């Protein structure tokens, strides 16, 4: 299967999950708005969700996949199975102890880490603690799910791992629909959602375990032992968890600061959900697929193939995310109004969320580039270099967030995260080039410059078109008119961008055709079709 088709497999499944995520957030906005229960739920959910992102998109995609691939190469499926069982035994035991400790310490964690600003509001603080206690076991479920996902990705079964997050959105949508149907209070709705998160975690773990068995890998539980393989995994995973979770770490810092302003956490979450669509569909898809492909090329001594993979991946992510960034900057108000403005979500809230979203849009290419650049280190079993870069960017984010929040509130938090994301991307890229791990192509640089020009032309056209359709996108307009007008704007943006990009040489049919036809060398245990 070609590289682009693998991106499309993961990206398509992620797209389905993110579309359902929009439906979930739309119902959430109608039911809770940016009220105290929305703040409490999002604050409580952020903590286990942070660990989920660290493990799923950081540690296991960075450390487990190359080692698992090496075991397949050296010992075949039996060796990989033994390694997986060793890791599973240790991981399960550590997570169980961590979950028990966190449950007991939850009041202190909320007060010092999750939401220090809630301490002065006894009711809000108490609800946040209780919701976090219910949802924290989700971490254990999702960390084990992350390991199973890493196994499936290494065996080149990408779809099952990518589609698993759909179940979280389906369960939470069900909880919200039930709450709205019953006329539940915001507090009752928050409880339904919290129990839904836990149920979804169990369901996702069961689905992935069935997927691993279907792929021919039946793993059992072994008594936890610190074998050399497990020690090597932990040595690589700890810095990789920090690196892979840079965006989430910065968001947690932003949440801690935002907890001092009512409604700020929920506003950041609503903006985050929108820009996570292109980030998830493109960035996560590339990160998930590129790492095992790159690791396999390097293990086989194919340096030229590895360089080609990296350049084509960066080309692919910028081709799709630059126009998304331009659109989020120009029509953020229209997007937020159509998606969220109803029920408890009023026009003032739209203005706050839209301003935050526009800034996140400027940071989007940087966030996505991080997903494409990290595998260049992880595939070489180097997780310390990106960790050092990540820690530097976290410091920058903290300084900017603390400095800007009193002046610009939610927009200040978004600005800090965007600057931090671009700093991380630039440092990762420069380091790879200087080490000779990234053979930089002049043709790629010229193509990116032309894509930027196409994005500017698209943004100007979009600005004029949104002014022309202003009446149909106004708050007073019927929802169907708003949806049609927004759909027209998106269609126009796509036509203008792709037309200009192909016309001036930012993209060409030959490039796309080569990527679609390109076949990767099959690895042991790989299916010929998904």
Image (spheres, helix red, strand yellow):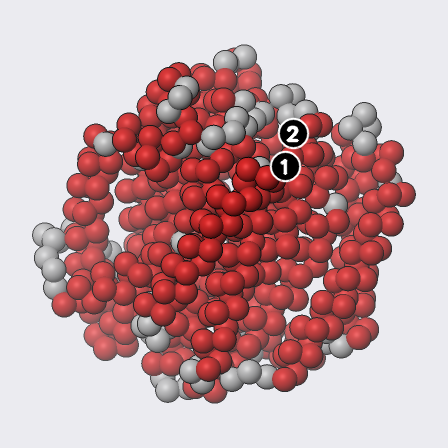
Taking the spot 81% from the left edge, 62% from the top edge, the residue there is: 457
* Image marks 1 and 2: residues in contact by CB distance under 8 Å: yes
* Residue of label 1: 353
Q: Front-most of 356 and 97?
A: 356
The reply to whether residue 11 is visible in this rendering is: no
What mark, if any, has residue 493 been given in the picture?
Answer: none
Taking the spot 89% from the left edge, 43% from the top edge, the residue there is: 468
421 vs 72, left or right, is: right
Q: How crowded is mark 2: few (under 14 residues within 10 Å), some or many (20 or more)?
A: some
Q: How crowded is mark 1: few (under 14 residues within 10 Å), some or many (20 or more)?
A: many
Image coordinates for residue 476, horizontal then vertical, percent:
81, 25
Image coordinates for residue 448, horizontal then vertical, percent:
67, 73
What mark, if any, has residue 349 been given in the picture?
Answer: 2
Image height of 367 relative to 475, above or below: below
Q: In which quarter of the image is residue 483?
A: top right
Q: Give the residue at the far right of this rendering.
A: 468
Q: Front-most of 408 and 87?
A: 408
């Amino acid at each position: 299967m070609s590289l682009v088709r693998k991106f499309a497999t993961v990206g398509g499944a992620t797209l389905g999950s993110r579309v359902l995520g929009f439906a979930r957030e739309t119902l959430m906005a109608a039911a809770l708005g940016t009220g105290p229960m929305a703040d409490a739920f999002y604050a409580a959910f952020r903590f286990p969700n942070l660990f989920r992102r660290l493990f799923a998109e950081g540690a296991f995609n960075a450390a487990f996949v190359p080692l698992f691939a090496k075991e397949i190469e050296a010992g075949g499926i039996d060796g990989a199975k033994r390694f997986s069982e060793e890791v599973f035994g240790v991981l399960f035991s550590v997570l169980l102890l961590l979950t028990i400790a966190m449950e007991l310490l939850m009041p202190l964690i909320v007060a010092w880490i999750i939401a220090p600003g809630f301490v002065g509001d006894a009711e809000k603080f108490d609800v946040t603690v209780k919701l976090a206690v219910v949802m924290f076991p989700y971490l254990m479920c999702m960390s084990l799910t992350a390991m199973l996902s890493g196994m499936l990705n290494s065996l080149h079964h990408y779809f099952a791992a990518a589609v698993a997050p759909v179940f979280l959105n389906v369960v939470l949508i069900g909880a919200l629909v039930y709450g709205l149907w019953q006329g539940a209070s915001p507090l009752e709705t928050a409880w339904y959602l919290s129990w839904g998160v836990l149920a979804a975690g169990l369901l996702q773990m069961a689905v992935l375990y069935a997927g691993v068995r279907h792929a021919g890998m039946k793993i059992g539980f072994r008594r936890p032992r610190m074998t050399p393989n497990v020690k090597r995994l932990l040595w690589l995973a700890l810095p990789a968890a920090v690196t892979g979770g840079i965006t989430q770490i910065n968001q947690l810092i932003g949440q801690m600061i935002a907890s001092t302003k009512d409604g700020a956490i929920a506003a950041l979450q609503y903006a985050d959900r929108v820009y996570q669509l292109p980030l998830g569909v493109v960035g996560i898809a590339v990160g998930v697929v590129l790492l095992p492909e790159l690791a396999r090329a390097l293990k086989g001594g194919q340096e030229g193939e590895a360089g080609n993979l990296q350049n084509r991946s960066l080309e692919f992510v910028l081709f799709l995310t630059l126009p998304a960034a331009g659109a989020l900057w120009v029509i953020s108000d229209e997007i937020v109004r159509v998606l969220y403005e109803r029920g408890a979500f009023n026009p003032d809230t739209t203005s706050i969320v839209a301003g935050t979203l526009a800034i996140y849009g400027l940071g989007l290419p940087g966030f996505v580039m991080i997903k494409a650049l990290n595998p260049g280190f992880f595939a070489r079993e180097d997780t310390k270099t990106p960790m050092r870069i990540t820690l530097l960017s976290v410091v920058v984010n903290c300084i900017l967030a603390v400095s800007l929040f009193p002046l610009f509130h939610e927009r200040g938090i978004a600005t800090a995260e965007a600057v931090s994301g671009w700093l991380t991307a630039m440092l990762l890229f420069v380091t790879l080039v200087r080490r000779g791990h990234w053979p930089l192509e002049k043709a790629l640089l010229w193509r990116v410059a032309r894509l930027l020009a196409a994005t500017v032309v698209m943004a100007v056209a979009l600005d004029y078109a949104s002014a022309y359709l202003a009446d149909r996108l106004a708050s007073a307009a019927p929802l169907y008119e708003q949806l049609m007008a927004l759909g027209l704007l998106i269609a126009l943006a796509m036509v203008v961008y792709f037309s200009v990009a192909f016309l001036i040489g930012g993209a060409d049919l030959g490039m796309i055709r080569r990527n679609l036809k390109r076949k990767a060398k099959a690895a042991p245990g790989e299916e010929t079709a998904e």
